[in-house]
Amino acid sequence: MSDLKERVTAALATVQDPEIHRPITELGMVRDVAVDAGAVTVTVALTVSGCPLREKIVADVTAAVEQVPGVASVAVELDVMTDEQRTDLRKRLKGGGEERTVPFAEPASLTRVYCVASAKGGVGKSSVTANLAAALARRGLSVGVLDADIYGHSIPRALGVRTMPVQVDRMIIPPVGHGVKVISMGMFTEKNAPVLWRGPMLHRALEQFLVDVFWGDLDVLLVDMPPGTGDVQITLAQMLPNAESLVVTTPHLAAAEVAERAGTVALQTKQRIVGVVENMAWAELPDGSRWEPFGSGGGAQVAATLTAELGYEVPLLGRIPIDPGIGLGADEGVPLVLGDEGAAASVLRTVGDWVADRPRGLAGRRLALDMS
């Protein structure tokens, strides 16, 4: 029996918590393994009593234990962690210290942070962000999206997130949509209630999203920025000094001028702009010709202006054509890049490939070297 119990315990080490993505044995969730002949009973302590993925945990534990030779039946009993156990879990995942720090601002962080920005609303920042995130996750990268548009949040719907974050002690476990970890103010408001906050409250919410959320080891964090150049932009520049920016514009010359304004904020915040994406660039007509209802050249103009003003090359990464599937995908929670083979999805995937192929690491950062 002891040999069977050891094999069952080894099998349980292959089961990961679906939210934290660590083995349940490592997280202290396996409270007991009882073996009676071939009948095995596993007691699992959930992080919270209302765990939304409890059925998946039961199914995964059952499937893993059933594969062990000598097991005739499997029963899974559920319990809940105590407050002390949740505190221990938080310390295990986020470190034992009580200091509140932004992990992505730490010198050892290898996560690339991209703020998807434009000073003008309605250019498609959120749809670009959601599709890029899904494309990167499809490539096998570990991806998170922080919806920093506190007043006009739309990322949860766009990425098909239907579950709420789970709080473990003072740590927040973000829900996942299409392989992307997501946090948004939309998860904390009742129904469609508006958020009526001034600067200090915005700062506190963004700090909590960056400090208290358990993001894990991300390859890429995308930040869906609100329009404008106000409180959120200043706060995130302070909290994420190593973040880079992707500027989204449309072909309108007016929109391009506003996008340039958002880009030149980088001169003050010291954030590097890595590229420009032109959205709603053209529409393909039935005869195969292209119609440009909003004009042309906006994206190229922004890239050229920013290159001249910033003193380094800011490339135009792609021109996304008008495609009703982008809006439909956002409404249904299935980003266009996950299934469509049209021109818009292709451009979005190309931009995603460009982001994915950039090296993860400290390249391009200023390093504080002690020459003494």
Image: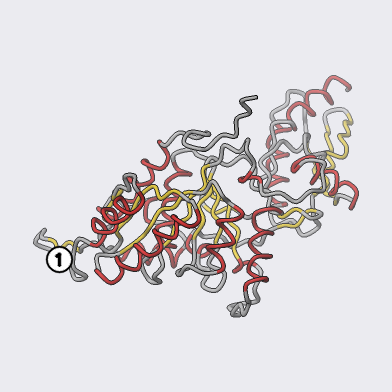
**Quarter holding the C terminus?**
top right
Q: Name the foreground residue: 307 vs 211.
A: 307
Residue 23: x and y in percent read 72, 36
Image spot of residue 114 (x, y percent): 48, 50
**In this picture, residue 122 sits left or right of residue 72:** left
Q: Residue at x 60, y 34 (%)?
A: 368
Identified at 79% across, 50% down, the residue is 47
Quarter occupied by residue 124: bottom left
Residue 256 in the figure: left or right of residue 97: left
Compared to 228, does 308 lie above or below?
above
Residue in front for this viewpoint, 206 or 220: 206
Q: Mark 1: which secondary structure?
A: strand
Query: Which percent across, then down, holds residue 328?
Result: 38, 66
Residue 243: x percent and y percent? 51, 49
- Quarter placement of the N terminus: top right
Q: Residue at x 73, y 26 (%)?
A: 68
Task: Write down the residue under mark 1.
Answer: 291
